Image (cartoon, rainbow, N blue to C red):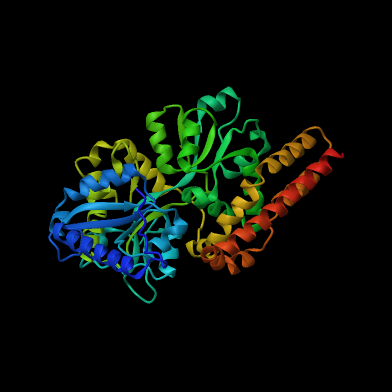
Amino acid sequence: MIFYDRKPGRNIPFLRHAAVIFLIALMTLSAGCVGGGGDDEESVTLTIITRHDTSIQEAFEKAFLASAQAQDAHVTKIRFMQPVPGLWPTAIDNGGIDVAWGGGPTLFDQLVDLGYLATLSEDGIPSLSDIPVSLGGAPMKRYAASSTDPVWVAAAISSFGFTVNHTVLDALSLETPDTWDDLADPSYLTDPPVIGIGNAPDTTSNTRIYEIILQNYGWEEGWVKLTEIAANSAIYYGSVDVLNAVETGLIAIGTTIDFYGYSSMLDYPNTEYIIPTGQSLLNGDPIAILANTDNRAAADAFLDYVLSPEGQSVWLIDTLNRMPVISSAFETDFGKTRTVLKDLYDLTIANQGIEFSDELAISYESTVVTYWEAVLDKPHEQLRRAWQALATALSEGKITQGEWEDYVFRLGEPLMTMAEAQDINESMLKDSSFSNARSVEWAAAKKAVYEQILAEIRAL
């Protein structure tokens, strides 16, 4: 459910404005009588802003409301909000939100920088002590400046890679990919595309994949690699759409977060989730309490349940198939039945991934998301044509391997340095007019590059 608070318009006449204020006050008072207000009331509604889908919302709502933590805190209802990440600051500023949950470390680190998150304490959240500081080299807790108290903590873990459909790969006589380099190889260039990826603004998990690639290869080479992968791929406008295309055989390879792949493997035996060898990372998916919550005791209770072994085992139900952050989830009565997921959990935390900096990722995240869409999605048709022409010219001997490499670098060379991306990052996040103007500029510039390369190849 998407919920937005609406403020009275400035053009409302005085009497009407007064009437609206009176009605709001009356509704608030009524809500308090039936349990919609703060911690000191008998019945509390907890409001959570989240990137998690309804299946996760429903599973945890049912389990939490039946828990001792919910009963002790008098929580009888949960209200979920699902705005896109760019609207989270606006929604939080409007007030009335208690907990932020899901969406990845970069999104939550932005909330930290904006001062939106409260510090967490074991006094209110006893199970907080069971969460490790790090796991597999990745942070599971983010600490406030000059403090021993965390501001967010991981509620689940994830890895990032791709899910493949072996039936489609076999039908096309294509090898199973193992690395990001494989996805960039022109041997996977087909029409229609055999690879599917997500548009950066529409999927935080695919954005994380692009950040992994940028840090794995470096800024310039990373953008070249992302351009090659995009040129091989169809672009989808949501991570679920990518997975559905793999499962239905529309494509053979789709970039996904791990639990999408694990769920697919259980439902579709011809699919497999692959962690790119030495090219992925473990990721803690955060949960936090908003600094302006009016329901702190209720928020503490929710986090305490989610981080407890019983709450962690909710991730293991067959409609979710997520990885918990603590192994004791597998020691609960239900967790002991999920042996396949336990094996995958052990594999996930044993993966030796890249050294990844959340701080570096957040320093250019807003720029990267907008730039990715501008140069890879908007002129995607022109990119595909140039890429196809290059691949054909190489295979026919019209260009040498060295010339191919030069052309590919021109194709993907970023229009700015990493330092320039960092310099405008805050403006990209907060100033939509600035962001839109740069997006238009970048799209036009890259379209011209793609068309110029295509013209040069055709002239050979």
Q: Quadrant of residue 235?
A: top right
Observer-nearest of 249 and 36: 36
* Horizontal arrangement in the rendering, residue 186 relative to residue 366 (left or right): right
Tell me residue 440's x, y (percent).
65, 55
Q: Position of residue 9 (x, y in %)?
A: 40, 64
Q: How many marks?
A: 0
Task: Look at the image and tell me whether residue 215 can be seen.
Answer: no
Q: Residue at x 60, y 64 (%)?
A: 434
| Residue at image coords 66%, 54% | 221
In the displayed structure, 84 sits above or below 335; it is below
Is residue 374 depicted above or below 456 in this figure? below
Give x and y (percent) for residue 419. Answer: 62, 67
Nearer the observer, 204 or 271? 204
Q: Position of residue 10 (x, y in %)?
A: 41, 68
Residue 262, image quadrant: top left
In the image, is 36 to the left or to the right of 322? left
Residue positioned most to the bottom? 146
Q: Residue at x 55, y 51 (%)?
A: 210
- Image quadrant in which you'd find residue 168: top right
Q: Quadrant of the C terminus?
A: top right
Residue sitting at the far right: 460
Residue 20 visible to the viewer: yes
